[in-house]
Amino acid sequence: MSDPILGMVMLGSFILIVLLGFPVAFTLMAMGVGFGYLSLEARVFDLLVQRTYAVMANDVLISVPLFVFMGYVIERANILDRLFHALQLASRNLPGALAVATLLTCALFATATGIVGAVVTLMGLLAYPAMLRAGYDARLASGITCAGGCLGILIPPSIMFILYGATAGVSVVKLYAAAFIPGFLLAGLYMVYTIGLATLRPSMAPKLPAHMATASGAQVVWALLTSFFPLAALIAAVLGAILAGLATPSEAAAMGSLGAILLALAYRALTFAKLKESVFLTARTTAMVCWLFIGAYVFTSVFGWLGGHHVIETWIVEHLNLSSLGFMILAQVVIFLLGWPLEWSEIVLIFVPIFLPLLDNFGIDPIFFGVLVGLNLQTSFMTPPVAMAAYYLKGVAPPQVRIQQIFAGCLPFVGIVILSMTLLYVFPHLALWLPDYLYGTAALPAGEPVDAIPEGGFRVDDLVPALPSFD
Amino acid sequence: MQRLLIGIDRVSAWAGKTAGWAIVALTAVICYEVFARYMFRAPTSWAYDTSYMLYGLLFMVAGAYTLSRGGHVRADFLYRSLSPRGQAMIDLPLYLLFFIPGTAALIWFGWDFFYISFLQNEHSSVTPDGPLIWPFKFLIPLSGALMLLQGLAEIVRCVIALRTGHWPDKLADVEEMETQVLALAAAQKAAAAAADHAAREAAR
Amino acid sequence: APQVSRAQTMTWRFQSTWPQRDIFHEFAADFVSRVNTLGGGRLRLELLPAGAVVGAFQLLDAVSAGTLDGGHGVSAYWFGKNKAFSLFGTAPPWFGDANQYLGWFYYGGGEALYNELINDILKVNVVGFQTGPMPTQPLGWFKNPIERVEQLRGLKYRTVGLATDLFNELGAAVVALPGGEIVPALERGVIDGAEFNNPSSDRALGFPDVAKVYMLQSFHQRTETFEVLFNKTKFDALPAELKGVLRHSAEAASADMSWKQQDRYSRDLLEMTQNQGVRAITTPRPILEAQLRAWDAVVARLEGDTSSPAAGPFFKKVCDSQRAWCRRVQTFYLRYEAPSVLSFNHFFARG
Ligand code: NA
Ligand code: NA
């Protein structure tokens, strides 16, 4: 068997074998080492060690544990119920008030913590029964909780874009800037859909019970001041520092962790026991992500060594003769379909690198591609058979809610994701405007032309002219 | 046997939790670097090396701890629906075939990688006067050994599950929020069902 | 027909330390194409870009271990293993140009010292050739012009090799990053200023997108050359003629690179200043002079490092050999060559 064919067999068998359910990191590592051994023999083990070291010395991934830590501290600080209560009060005059409050809480909390499971289960316990009691359609309530809970991996600062940046070798800062508007656009579309539905079909999302609708303005302001604003300010500070270039993502994450600790102290929610829990959970989650990265690195290295990338490139560029649009649709459909059985992390680390070398051929900006992938991966949480969000919700929902109802409820939201991807493709400026605006360095007025010969000729002293002024 | 398995869990948990505190040090180092830059206009050369070393220490050593907690992500929609016996039937061969070779290689070849660096007394190439790098490289065989040890415990657990049809107990520890919430919800549902049942019994 | 020995083609995996789009990767490809032509179907190198198998900074380990059969990079990337590595390729600015450095390497005892370093001191399992003379490297890319030496103090700056010690001496906080990681780091704010190498590479790596001030002239890397590495076990097993193919291809590629860069570097600098809003500024002389003084301190400190015979004493041995060569050869050329400034002005700067 030639090496490139070996590479294809390796990729194909990975997709099947990973579904057996053995930890993905070790499955990847083993398949890399196993198939690598057929061509590299014992040298593949050195490759494993060198790739492991590359993950250890990776200065982009440093921000992963820091953001994770910040997330756990916020999560353990018990601010979710305050937040939900306040937003519920604040949105009480809107149609579908509970739904809007749920979506807002999810979006904000998910963005701060980035932990999808925690958001969906906590909201599943808190907001979901409240919606059901208020007479909401179970499907709609499910869709809102699941879709809202996943926003955290899309809206920056999110770990997904750190992994994408580390894989694609593009700036995480630019990715954050590019994902900013599309992230809020998606959250906005969710809200527009919900409010629209509540207005057109009030039976699906009835108004709040009377006692909830009578809070005074002062109560609302106070509730918001003590719950919504501190958290929103923390996120805004972290994200603002990154986007304004005041701090690197890891610096902002470290400052964010410090801020989260102070916030938790202010809420009197931080005990040493809770800090310890956050530290230990951070260690576990970071190890999970980074060992997965090691597995993926070994796998893609061996795939590259065997010439697998080259086969795919030849096949897509020469045999299929795709246009840029055709390639984009193919890539996104493949990622969408992979999102059924797999989770976002495997897709970003294994399959996205296969498309990346092709982007140049089709003139596609890797930042733009990254944002599209980020939107696309929102669906992977909601599409069966592996629909993390749906399963978490099922686990906490009242027994009469069936998993099929939850899937049905997610379906319109999957549709909204696809709509937003289409919008983004048609209006790429939604992603590209902000990074251009923030980081497009203005051209300087031309100084002395570099091809000019000085009046009277060069002298050694002329080679060191006085500095031209800039104003 | 169960005491030995829990003992291995303890070793992994102790190592992983100890390394876990690196996150606090990492937060402190980076916050200091930010202050040094903005308050004293004196960014440090050492923060860069220190940061990736703390980060590497954190996740490498915590790998075995994560394994002991079942924290390494699986594509598990089929796996989850299986009985413990079925799960063990998948896990046992894959631990032997997929897990052991890689972790053994991390120990064996990672040791060479470390040892050459040690003989060269290698320093970091990333910063001038960079710190010694071989202690950092030593984390590879060390973590490989921790992983292998925990992996052997998991293999024994697979054998027990195949024999008895139940997964043996693990060391109790802090849980993810969703796990806590799910457990709580399951308990509530069970309680509600029991109360419901009792009420109907009483009505009869 | 005469029987040409066409035994099996050996294919070797050869990785560069450069991103695919960098002109340095093209120079690596130029070397590879010479080997493949001269190898006559018996030895074929398959070129891979940085990161395809290992990251740039891991190339030496990978070639030594045999994960890769060979690679294309610069010795300064390995100076964490021994500071003297940087002397092979990018020494203090005492050579007149990089070809004089190559003269020292091949005819002034440099290769023997290099082999002493890799074989006896570090015991890495590689064979290396120096090839490809580079011109002076610019001070680099900044948000604002560097007008005074003090501006370097507290600046987070990227360079590699001994130049990291130089900028450290000048008060900068220095980070060495591989070529492909510099622009994202500049964008993330990990660094405030950076140099990589030359107008073509810098342009291809995207520097003009993130900074517009390009400071030309500097003494931090007045000369540099590439290093081509092969796994020693594999190399030693080659028949003599294929060993010759590898050595002579390095020589041929060295000459070719010195010609090709004349065309490409000058064009790319024009392109950036005319069409990408880049302002090319000559580094003020006080900064150049401060660099020379800082070099004195760096060299004295490293030569005086008595922690082991492989540290200061070996470093000094290499420096002494280089300085002896430079004194003789530079004096020769400075006395010998008619000044090109004079003739250039005569033909192109009259009236
Ligand atoms: Na899915
Ligand atoms: Na350079």
Image (cartoon, coloured by chain):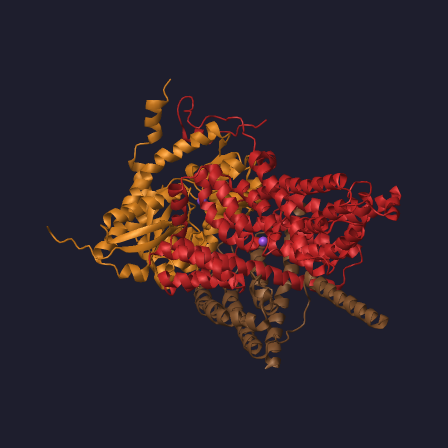
Chain colours: A red, B brown, C orange
Q: Position of residue A324 (x, y in %)?
A: 47, 37
Q: Is residue A201 left or right of residue B113?
A: right
Q: Is residue A172 visible to the viewer in this orientation of the structure?
A: yes
Q: Which quarter of the rendered picture does the C terminus of chain B lie within? A: bottom right
User: Which residue is at the far top?
Assistant: C351
* Nearer to me, B106 or B157: B157
User: Which residue is at the far front?
Assistant: B204
* Nearer to me, B78 or B96: B78
* Nearer to me, A173 or A291: A291
Q: Position of residue A259 (x, y in %)?
A: 72, 52
Query: Toward which corner of the image does residue A35 lie, by quadrant?
Result: bottom left
Q: Position of residue B157 (x, y in %)?
A: 57, 75
The correct choice, above or below, for C339 with respect to A262 in the image is: above
Query: Toward which corner of the image does residue A420 lie, by quadrant?
Result: top right
The correct choice, above or below, for B149 with respect to C241 in the image is: below
Q: Position of residue C148 (x, y in %)?
A: 55, 37
Q: Which quarter of the rendered picture does the N terminus of chain B lie within? A: bottom right
Q: Residue at x 45, y 37 (%)?
A: A323
Q: Is residue C80 visible to the viewer in this orientation of the structure?
A: no
Q: Is residue C104 left or right of residue A70?
A: left
Q: Residue at x 54, y 29 (%)?
A: A444
